Amino acid sequence: MSAKRPPAPAQLPRMLSDGLLLRHAVPEDRDALGDLLASVHAAPDGTPNATVGQWQRDLFDKGHPTIGTDDMLVVQDRHGELVSSFLMVPQTWSYAGVPLGVSLMELAATRPDYRGHGLSKEQLNALLETSTLRGDLIQGITDILSFRSDTGLLPAITQRAGRGGHIRDLPAIREGDEAVTTRPATVEDIAFLIDTEARAMNRGLLACVRDETQWRHELFGRDVGSMVHSEILIIERAARPVGYLVLGYGGTPSFPIPSWLPGLPCPEPTVSIARFELAPEVSWFEVVAGVLRQLTLPDRGTPESYMLWLGREHPAYDVLGDLLVRRPPEIGWFLRVPDVAALLREIAPVLEQRLIGTAAEALSGDVHLDLYRHGIRLSFDSGKLSAVEAWAGHSRRASDASLPEQMFHQLIFGHATWAELARAFPDCRLQTTRGSVLLPLLFPEQQSDVWPLI
């Protein structure tokens, strides 16, 4: 899983207009590329953002389990100076246990005097093409919203959702409760981390899968000065590992945390928690408050509040209940599916499982979906999805369901129910009884909290 994927057919370097050259990055670009990213992502007062530059430098200095030079693009001017960059992070996601090849687009930057020339879009299209040729079934990006309309990157799932509260409101540790402690994770903890994370993935639909090499990257692959550096702590009780925490960005560089909440300055020191998981034999009720209190120690700056960036739903939210007085705005993943039929064929075992025990359990026959610009035919044989093919003669009237492609993406990825999405997409129709029964069964709402590998 951590092996770098084979490169796509070479199409670079390529000359663009005005003497600009689009090419792959090379090790000699380390400092210039880090400086470019730091300056483009500077603070409002013009101070370079060294943390973004360090993120890029780490990819040269420390390596990465999945990124190769074919995944890094730069544009240089006629004088050899770098004026724009973009990169792609290959990884594996799980769709209800089915592994899927995914590539995320990251670290985009273009010098202000070269904006408006389509350089980021040129690089993004090259990366998407490379990803497609490699066989990736999903491609994603966050934050850079202006690309979605003509690249196929469409809002699909929630990317960062959280809840927060004040340390002072946490319940006191009950007498007789066994104390919990935290310590930095080490390489000896990797097997425990893999096992605990594998169980946690069962709570959601989509998750990023990490093997031993990728966990080593999480532990040691980033300088402390990197924007995406995270601290991983092991939770112990009676000197035995019972869970783990990820402090910091958790691989999601969306907001300057812990000093800010999304869109708002946070009025007090805050600790940001990007991952919080326990072993199955441990009760969340017994450890949540104790773990959060562990994070208020003086060596951590004595935070007064906490933010749990754990998705829309999480056991810790249930335990803390009304103590979670902060609920910042959510943002979303923009996902592209190069071949929807290929994705559906890959996740066929999941779709078939969802029909068991329903009126469609032993269904035989075709289901026609009209996505307006193209169509898909799903063929079932005694409840098994035997074929998924393009429907050349697609039309609304002949379909079992008609819906825009963005709505279909959100259904596939469990973002909401058909009924909920129909309010946002009034041009959808369940045309037949078969469609009315099958679509909600095949694509139920199911939360995802993807902690990406970056």
Image (cartoon, grey):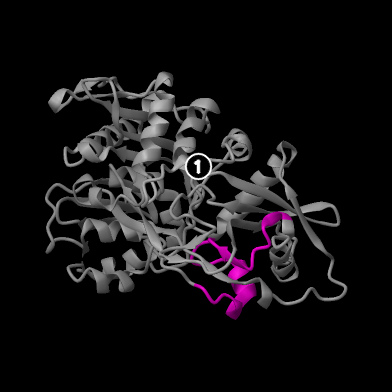
Where does label 1 land, which residue?
A: 453
Please tell me whether residue 107 is drawn above or below residue 249 in the rendered image: above
Where is residue 416? Give x, y as percent.
37, 67
Residue 329 part of the magenta-drawn span:
no
Expressed as whole percent of the image width and height from the top left, the position of residue 415 reads 38, 63
**Residue at the outermost bottom position:** 322
- Range covered by the magenta-colored residues: 299-326
284 relative to 12 in the view: left or right: right
Is residue 319 highlighted in magenta? yes
Counting other residues with Cα less than 10 Å from the Cα at mark 1, is it few (<14), some (14-19), or many (20 or more)?
many
Left or right, residue 105 beside residue 356: left
Question: Count the marks: how many?
Answer: 1
Task: Identify the image quadrant of residue 68.
Answer: top left
* Residue 53 visible in the snapshot: yes
Q: Is residue 435 left or right of residue 445?
A: left
Q: Is residue 77 left or right of residue 105?
A: left
Residue at (17, 68) in percent of width and height: 427
Which residue is found at the position 26% from the left and 57% from the top? 406
Is residue 136 in view from this perspective?
no
Instruction: Give x and y (percent) for residue 89.
Output: 42, 37
Q: Secondary structure at mark 1?
A: loop
x, y percent for residue 27? 43, 20
At x 27%, y 37%, the residue is: 111
Using the rendered view, name the quadrant where residue 35 is placed: top left
Under mark 1, the amino acid is Leu
**Residue at position x 33%, y 50% in the image:** 335
For the residue pair 48 and 300, the one nearer the viewer reads as 48
Image quadrant in which you'd find residue 132: top left
